[in-house]
């Protein structure tokens, strides 16, 4: 594909050894990329996998294929890379695997690279966007089905299991990440995965979920109340909601991702919650649940049409609880479209 050839040229390499699973899938279409590698050249991609996947690879991928296990795969690729500058994904290749490349490819110049394919993946095609929509639809429908179970006396882990079941029934093929179900004081844990804790009346519960549909993922968080909550928890909830909705309204092509983070952070700071916002505003979503662009204060990324991002400010107060509200947002030609439809309940 022309974009692959141009990306290699920009990176100053003649070929790229692809080992990150989502990138293997991106360049070959192979849906078991954790058991595959790819060699990308200006002429196209070669998919390397083993005999368990001979028929699957034939059906799924139009790339040239070589079916074998290492070291035969590396010996085959050695003929293709002789005399070339070959990039490898420095943040996805183990030291042992790099040693193997050096041993089997003595006539190639190996070059550490980062972000070659990730840069291409920033802008989603209409087909990719549709798959992300479907993943988000599954998550929204599953959350709606399970929401009545989030009440006093329920166990966090039971809620997690119920969400998993509802997603499976709706076509999910996996989870974007480990689900977060964190009630009461555990809401102060940004990654408070479901536990055996029993939910109590008068607390907030943070639920962060994402489905996988045809390889693409969704990501959404809602914080809901169990019974009547305190005035302080209501204040925190509405401060986070204000920051989230203001950041969404500011999404459009040409906006610096760092400026969105600053906008939301300044609002929370104005409510005395700046120090309680312990992470960046969001991230890109696609084949991986965390990919570019990065919506953090130090980011150089600029929004473009076709990017799919999360907007997810939060406030976490040890001993009290926490709030995070997260929407999945598509950057359009003239603004944005919110893909997540689960209501943000009044608290």
Image (spheres, rainbow, N blue to C red):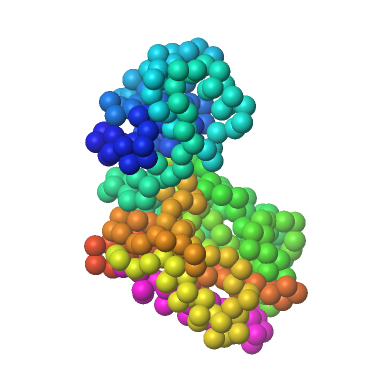
- Residue at the spot x=47%, y=46% of the render? 288
| x and y, in percent, of residue 156 in the image | 68, 59
Question: Does residue 211 show up magenta in the picture?
Answer: no
Give the camera-side residue of 87 and 279.
87
Above or below: residue 271 compared with residue 343: below
Quarter of the rendering containing residue 224: bottom right
Which quadrant is home to the N terminus? top left
- Residue at the spot x=53%, y=46% of the render? 175
- Residue at the spot x=41%, y=34% of the render? 25
Is any atom of residue 1 visible in this view? yes
Is any atom of residue 138 visible in this view? no
* Magenta residues (range): 225-252
- Residue at the spot x=56%, y=82% of the render? 269
Name the chief secondary structure element in magenta: helix
Give the camera-side residue of 273 and 165.
273
Above or below: residue 20 compared with residue 125: above
Give the camera-side residue of 346 and 20.
20
| x and y, in percent, of residue 84 in the image | 38, 24
Which quadrant is home to the C terminus? bottom right
Quarter of the rendering containing residue 71: top right
Give the camera-side residue of 98 and 286.
98
| x and y, in percent, of residue 219 in the image | 48, 56
| x and y, in percent, of residue 172 in the image | 47, 44
Quarter of the rendering containing residue 343: bottom left
How many marks overall? 0
Question: Does residue 228 show up magenta in the picture?
Answer: yes
Left/right of residue 163 with respect to residue 317 in the rendered view: left
């Amino acid at each position: 594909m022309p974009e692959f050839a141009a990306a290699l040229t920009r990176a100053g390499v003649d070929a790229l050894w692809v080992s990150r699973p989502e990138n293997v899938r991106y360049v070959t279409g192979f849906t078991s990329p954790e058991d595959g590698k790819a060699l990308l050249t200006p002429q196209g991609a070669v998919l390397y996998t083993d005999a368990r996947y001979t028929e699957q690879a034939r059906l799924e991928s139009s790339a040239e294929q070589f079916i074998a296990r290492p070291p035969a795969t590396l010996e085959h690729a050695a003929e293709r890379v002789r005399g070339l500058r070959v990039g490898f994904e420095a943040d996805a290749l183990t030291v042992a695997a790099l040693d193997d490349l050096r041993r089997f490819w003595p006539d190639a110049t190996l070059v550490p690279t980062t972000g070659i394919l990730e840069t291409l993946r920033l802008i989603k095609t209409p087909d990719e966007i549709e798959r992300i929509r479907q993943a988000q639809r599954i998550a929204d429908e599953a959350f709606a089905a399970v929401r009545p179970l989030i009440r006093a006396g329920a166990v966090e882990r039971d809620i997690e299991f119920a969400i998993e079941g509802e997603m499976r029934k709706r076509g999910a093929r996996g989870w974007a990440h480990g689900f977060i179900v964190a009630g009461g004081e555990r809401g102060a844990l940004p990654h408070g995965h479901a536990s055996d804790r029993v939910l109590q009346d008068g607390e907030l519960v943070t639920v962060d979920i994402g489905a996988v549909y045809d390889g693409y993922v969704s990501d959404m968080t809602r914080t809901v109340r169990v019974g009547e909550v305190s005035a302080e928890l209501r204040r925190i909830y509405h401060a986070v909601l204000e920051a989230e909705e203001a950041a969404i309204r500011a999404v459009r092509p040409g906006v610096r991702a760092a400026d969105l983070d600053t906008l939301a952070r300044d609002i929370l700071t104005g409510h005395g919650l700046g120090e309680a916002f312990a992470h960046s505003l969001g991230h890109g979503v696609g084949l991986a649940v965390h990919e570019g662009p990065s919506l953090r204060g130090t980011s150089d990324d600029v929004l473009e049409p076709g990017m799919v991002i999360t907007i997810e400010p939060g406030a976490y107060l040890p001993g009290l609880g926490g709030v995070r509200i997260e929407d999945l947002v598509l950057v359009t030609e003239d603004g944005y479209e919110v893909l997540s439809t689960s209501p943000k309940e009044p608290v």
